[in-house]
Image (tube, rainbow, N blue to C red):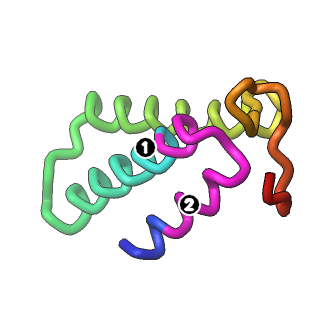
Amino acid sequence: MAISFWLLSVAMRTIPVGTAYAIWVGIGAVGVAILGMVLLGESRDIMKIVCLLLIVAGIVGLGFSIARGLITFNHGSDGSRPYKIGTST
């Protein structure tokens, strides 16, 4: 769990907090659901699988949006300066 929090903090250095958190929660939700089906024998009905695939599609969509620059991260309260990795201001 500590690794998960650390990876979230690393991601938040380069992408917006809301986007990073949405991806983090989505990965966790899908992971727990899959573990429940595999290890605990929970149901594997088609509706559950479709909904999990929709969550995965949302995560992938957010990832593509970040990669294509559709989601940007501005550093500073006025939103005028783009955040650059390795800068302190």
Give the image quarter of residue 17: top right
What type is the residue that disc 2 sits on?
Answer: Ser
Residue at disc 1, secondary structure: helix
Neighbours of disc 2 within 10 Å: few (<14), some (14-19), many (20+)? some
Outermost residue, bottom direction?
Answer: 2
Neighbours of disc 1 within 10 Å: few (<14), some (14-19), many (20+)? some
1 w.r.t. 72: above or below = below
Labelled disc at residue 16: none
- Identify which residue is drawn at 52% across, 69% down: 6
What type is the residue that disc 1 sits on?
Answer: Gly
Front-most of 12 and 64? Answer: 12
- Across and down, in percent, residue 55 comes to 44, 34
Q: How many numbered marks appear?
A: 2
- Identify which residue is drawn at 63% across, 39% down: 16
Of badges 2 and 1, the one in the foreground is: 2
Labelled disc at residue 9: 2
Front-most of 35 and 46? Answer: 35
Does the stretch in magenta take in 77? no
Residue placed under numbered mark 1 in the picture: 26
Predominant SS along the magenta part: helix
31 w.r.t. 23: above or below = below
- Magenta highlight range: 6-21
Does the stretch in magenta take in 17? yes
Front-most of 77 and 54? Answer: 77
- Identify which residue is drawn at 85% across, 50% down: 84
- Identify which residue is drawn at 22% across, 37% down: 45
Q: Is residue 33 left or right of residue 21?
A: left
- Across and down, in percent, residue 81 comes to 85, 34
- Across and down, in percent, residue 19 comes to 57, 37
Q: Is residue 71 left or right of residue 18?
A: right
